[in-house]
Image: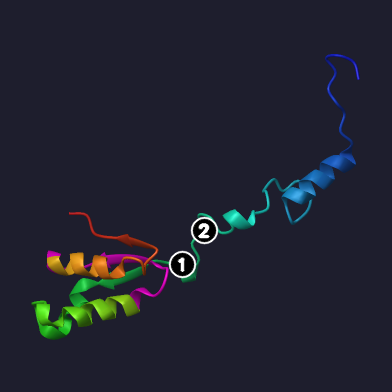
Amino acid sequence: MMRGQKARVSPTAVNVRNSLRDPRGAGGGRALAHPRNAGAGVTTASEAPVVIDVARLYGADGETARQERLAEYERCARELAGEGRHVVLTGRGPIWLYLRLAHALHGVARSLTLPRT
């Protein structure tokens, strides 16, 4: 090859390269997911966030959350959240309950989102 000339690539080599990038065949343009990046940025039904309404946790007690039943509220929130899921705490409730639920879900939930005020 002389200086200034571009290397020629055979059409077969291009098709092979494209078929490695796209499982549907040549010309797709999307690279296959590396196992390290599998599912990155994709939310499936099983990965949809779990929404916990704080007011429903203490709803059986009336309009006021009771500190005596705090362990029950925490247990219920852990059961609803599941292991390694994205959790959203929402609804009316005292700040001390939000803080204790966030503390109880630490290490259980993959991520925790609280409402903005």
Horizontally, is 39 left or right of 11 in the view?
Answer: left
Q: Which quarter of the figure has residue 37?
A: bottom right
Q: Say which residue appears at 83% left-offset and 14% top-offset.
A: 4
Q: Which residue corresponds to the image point at 50% horizontal and 54% vertical from the top-left?
A: 41
- Name the residue beneath numbered marker 2: 42
Spot occupied by residue 116 in the image (x, y as percentages of width and height): 22, 54
Q: Is residue 33 magenta?
A: no
User: Identity of the amino acid at label 1?
Assistant: Glu
| Closer to the camera in the image, 72 or 51 | 72
Image-based side of 106 in relation to 83, left or right: left
| Mark 1 in CB contact with mark 2 (< 8 angstroms) | yes
Where does residue 102 sit, x and y in percent of width and height? 25, 65
The quadrant of the rendering that contains the C terminus is bottom left
Q: CA distance from mark 1 to mark 2?
A: 9 Å
Q: In this rendering, would 12 be left or right of 38?
A: right
Image mark for residue 47: 1
Q: Quadrant of the N terminus?
A: top right
- Residues drawn in magenta: 80-95
Examine the rendered structure and indicate whether residue 84 appears above or below residue 36. Answer: below
**What residue is drawn where x is 86% and y is 41%?**
13
Q: Nearer the viewer, residue 81 or 75?
A: 75
The x and y percentages for residue 100 are 20, 68
Residue at the location (18% across, 74% down)? 55
Height in image: 116 above or below 60? Answer: above
